Image (cartoon, rainbow, N blue to C red):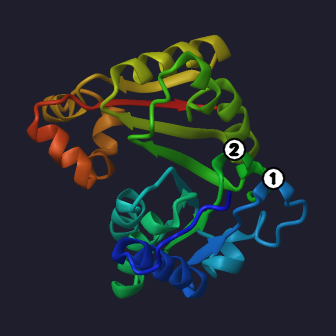
Amino acid sequence: MARKFDLTKPNLTKKLARFADIGKFSNCVEVPMAHEVTDFALKGNWAKDHFNNQNPITLELACGKGEYSTGQAELYPNRNFIGVDIKGNRIWIGAKHALENNLTNVGFLRTRIDHISNLFGEGEVDEIWIIFPDPQLQSNREKNRLTSANFIERYRKILKKDGIVQLKTDNLPLFEYTQEVIAELGLTTLCESTDVYADLEKGENTFLCAREKELRIQTYYEGLWLKEGRKINYIAFSV
């Protein structure tokens, strides 16, 4: 039986309006069927054709409302940032903020992350941030974890040589799982912390301190978790 939607409901009406907006926003690109793409025009050309520059590119995967993408864009006007998520209702918030604040160095891509190598060229991306992703802790969901081996292989295809992947999460099991994957693949861990804000206050880790501005960007939910006393884990590694 076909699913029926009540278009009179305010939340659904808002979602549909936001999806329509995304299709018009100059800073948004939609490729919902990325697995079918074989010749994507922006592949290898994001900086030149989307941002009209040659600046380095940072991706935020599963970006949600894009708080990290827009936050970093404000900090680093000479870098390009792309928030990637399949949920258009969430992307709309970050895209709208960027347009209203004239943040021309940040864009949003609505697509599935598991086919991201179809949309970016080899070595096109400088670094990747994964901010509080769904940990997918069920054993049968391992392949969907954004730091699983199969995802890291996808990142290898689009990251420059020695490109960096950075994970920030309140979920200790996901952090520990990521450590295991890094070890199994023989990758280089650049920095790790099970209490990133406490370690930033200590100021002893050079790598951590160099990224203090980015690491202090907080999502709405991170702010709530910190008030609950949760510790935030962070790990950076090169591929």
At x 46% / y 55%, what residue is drawn?
A: 63
Any part of residue 121 in sight: no
Q: In which quadrant of the rendered view does residue 199 lie? A: top left
The residue where tag 2 is placed is 114
Q: Amino acid at mark 1?
A: His
Tell me the kind of residue under disc 2.
Asp
In the image: residue 78, left or right of residue 126:
left
- Give coordinates of residue 120: x percent, y percent: 74, 57
Q: Examine the rendering and report whether any part of residue 50 can be seen.
A: yes
Q: Quadrant of residue 1?
A: bottom right
Residue at image point 86% right, 57% down: 36
Q: Which mark is residue 35?
A: 1
* Residue density around tag 1, few if under 14, some if 14–19, many if 20 or more, within 10 Å: some
Q: Is residue 186 left or right of residue 93?
A: right
User: In the rendered view, would you say 47 is above or below 116?
Assistant: below
Distance in Å between CA atoms under marks 1 and 2: 8 Å
Residue 214: % across, % down: 33, 51
Q: Residues within 10 Å of mark 2 (few under 14, many from 20)?
A: some
**Which element is circle 1 on?**
helix
Discs 1, 2 touching: Cβ within 8 Å: yes
From the viewer's perspective, is 118 left or right of 59? right
Q: Nearer the viewer, residue 37 or 9?
A: 9
Q: Position of residue 95 (x, y in %)?
A: 45, 75
Task: Provide residue 218's location: percent of width, then percent of height.
Answer: 25, 51
Which residue is nearer to you in this view: 89 or 126?
Answer: 89
Q: Quadrant of residue 121?
A: bottom right
Pick the quarter of the image with the C terminus.
Answer: top right
